[in-house]
Amino acid sequence: MKKFILLFFVVSIIASCGGKAGVNSADATGMKTLERPKRIADMMAARGEQDAAAPTLKIIEPAADATINGATVKVKLEISGDLKGYKPHMDMETKMGNHVHVILDNQPYEAYYNLDSEFELRNVADGEHTLRVFPSRPWHESYKNEGAFQMVKFTVKNGGGDAAKPTTTANGNTMATPEGKDMKMSLAGKVDATKPLLTFSRPKGEYKDADADAIMIDFWLANAKLTGDGGEYRVKYTVDNGEAKFIEKWEPIWLTGWTAGRHVLSLELVDKDGKPVDNGGYNTTVRDFMVTK
């Protein structure tokens, strides 16, 4: 009888730790998965119809397959679609607002807030590169409608960019070294725009105060559907090289229970059998970020 009770207790613990991403669950470390924190839900409610918008982007510069002579790459975007009041901008008091995530190769994104002002990528190394963009909400959750995500390939020649230095944006923030962390300059892999492509978006940077209570995992998925959406792919994630978990619906999740310090998150696109799906090396991405409490 005692053995039966002990076995039942162990099975119960295992079952409680095996919840799917997207529903409330906890793992052995005490970290929990949430659907959406109340403060985010409150922000959404205050935005009216904006979260039901379907913004679409068009990359004007750099043009697809363009060759750019010089290490500075100008980025120009146009936004259209069913905007419902959505417009990229920054509130100067809160330093938040709608914006576009701009990603050079597979580096962390840069937030582009004012599409009417000039935006540049500087010190871009010679060679082929990939630029990816998609619109985002103030809390960095991406819009996932058709036409929101755009990508172009381009080549830099005779630019003289120093690979030992980070690529920077026009406002002086670094593109390849976000939050002051040095990263190696990378060139674009052989990305096939028609094959499944996972674009890492969040987490990024430093989280403190209320932002450290629940941290969002978000990404853009092109040319693929996850199993929970009627497809045959999943997104595998691990935190600090811990137990692998899976996201089966294309929607953000929030994790709570973070300890102070630096953490590492890995996102990988896999098929229904758990095998990695490669596309230029971009479907497996590792990012580190800081939690301050």
Image: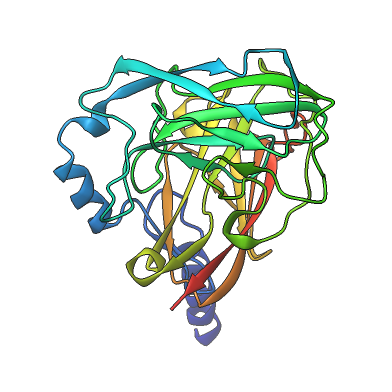
What kind of colouring is applied to the model shown?
A: rainbow
The percent coordinates of residue 227 (x first, y second) are 52, 32
Residue 261 coordinates in the image, percent (x, y):
56, 76
Q: Position of residue 6 (x, y in %)?
A: 52, 81
Image-based side of 137 in relation to 204, left or right: left
Q: Nearer the viewer, residue 40 or 78?
A: 78
- Residue nearest the viewer, comparing 194 with 174: 174
Q: Could you tell me if residue 223 is visible in this image?
A: no
- For image coordinates 51% across by 59% down, the residue present is 18
Residue 50 in percent (x, y) is at 23, 31
Q: Residue at the location (42% across, 50% down)?
A: 253
Residue 130, picture quadrant: top right
Q: Nearer the viewer, residue 182 or 213?
A: 182
Q: How many marks?
A: 0
Q: Looking at the image, which residue sits at the far bottom?
A: 2
Vertical order, 71 against 174 (above or below): above
Q: Is residue 123 visible?
A: yes
Above or below for 220 versus 41: above
Q: Is residue 196 above or below residue 180?
A: above
The C terminus, quarter of image? bottom left
Looking at the image, which is closer to me, 244 or 48? 48
